[in-house]
Image: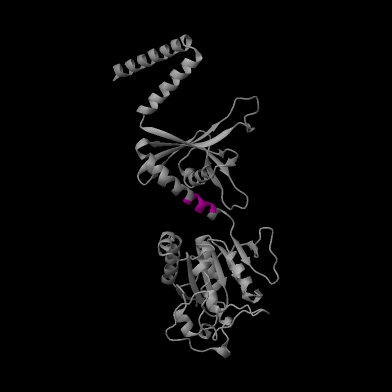
Amino acid sequence: MKEFWTSLVSLLGVLASLMNILKVVLPPEAWFAAFSFLIRALNYFSSYCYCDVTKMDGVNTNELYNAVQLYLSSFVSASASRLSLTRAINSSATTFGLSNDVCINDVFDGVAVQWEHVVTQRQSQTFSWQPHPDEKRGFRLRIRKRDKDFILNSYLDYIMDKANNIRHKNQQRLLYTNSLGRTLDSRGQPWDSVPFKHPSTFDTLAMDPERKRDIMEDLSNFTVGQALYGQTGGAWKRRYLLYGLPGTGKSSTIAAMANFLYYDIYVLELTQVRSKSELLNLLMKTSSKSIIVIEDIDRLVNPSKRSKMPQAATPQSYYDPGPSDSMRSLEDGNNNTITFWELLNFPDGLWSCCGSERIFIYTTSHFEKLDPALLESSPMDMQICVS
């Protein structure tokens, strides 16, 4: 073994001497061409290839760079010895990042890769803590050549999805509500919002443990069901009916669901909606990954006009809302009305393209006032009794 290392050192010394001789003998252009040829030859025989993800894509920020930075921050704190700490505006969490020229290993579906945070800058007389205008930041990905297609096609998409989830969890959650005569804000939104900091979680919620497990499992299946909803062509939404006496915990249950999913909450106050078009505008302006709460739905049913629905009742389309004589409508001066059945079926049909991954929660304190025929034919995915 000693003889091997001695021979290797001698060989490297001969190569270094030869390169110095060639550098003196050959003109600069020929030397540069020979050096480039040597680098290509070494890369050809190497089993690895490298991909650079620069921070700037021309004049715009490279979104993939931001995604890689967020993705690595989810586990870099446990494995890297030198970290860069940041906290974005309106963020509730500290982001861990790789310091300059630090490497970290990752494994995706059994394939090992290595990330390195690369910072290059031109030598100048400025102080070291001052960023140079020519400074270039990026990540360098080292992968095996045999895994190149798999990594570029699947791994990077996985990173983008994970980064979006991390970004969503880190941002401040909001509670939205609508008010009568509300004008659009600077972003064209008809909703007022305040920070949502309700402390209720499923751990603190007073509910039967088996029922809580069922709700949490249903919510978890919903969040990962994009492919299933895409295959069936349905809107990516879920409907829950919460019923129980006042003070039994319906609001706490909704808050626990929002904290579990990291969703915003929209509380739709129907008494402040003056027309059908205004209601549709409010619903279409809700964002994805949100919970839309419609409280006291029993008030929509007019007891003086309650009657049984047809026995062969089936979910109707938006344009054919079905029997409306047993339901109270929202009405304006032009008789522009919307029925309770239309409200239940809003996420279906053509309106399903207006947002995705949304949960509709309907609450009532007087379950007995709801028409049994309406409950049997309504598109509720889960009915939850809060007691």
Q: Please tell me how many numbered marks the rendered image carries.
A: 0
Q: Position of residue 71 (x, y in %)?
A: 49, 46
Residue at the image point whose x is 55% and y is 46% from the top: 95
Residue at the image point whose x is 50% and y is 14% from the top: 28
Please identify the quadrant where the N terminus is shown: top left
Q: Position of residue 180 (x, y in %)?
A: 69, 72
Residue at the image point whose x is 35% and y is 32% from the top: 47
- Residue 164 covered by magenta stretch: yes
* Foreground residue among 279 and 319: 319
Image side of residue 354 versus residue 334, left or right? left
* Residue 51 visible (yes or no): yes
Q: Is residue 281 above or below residue 24?
A: below
Q: Which residues are magenta?
A: 161-167
* Foreground residue among 280 and 150: 280
* Residue 249 visible (yes or no): no
Taken as a whole, is the magenta stretch helix, strand or loop? helix
Q: Is residue 55 above or below residue 172?
A: above
Q: What colour scheme governs how the chains and residues are painted in the rendered image of this protein?
A: one colour
Q: In which image quadrant can residue 229 be found?
A: bottom left
Q: Position of residue 138 (x, y in %)?
A: 52, 37
Image side of residue 251 versus residue 16, left or right? right
Q: Is residue 89 above or below residue 371?
A: above
Q: Is residue 276 above or below residue 285?
A: below
- Residue 349 covered by magenta stretch: no
Q: Position of residue 230 (x, y in %)?
A: 43, 61
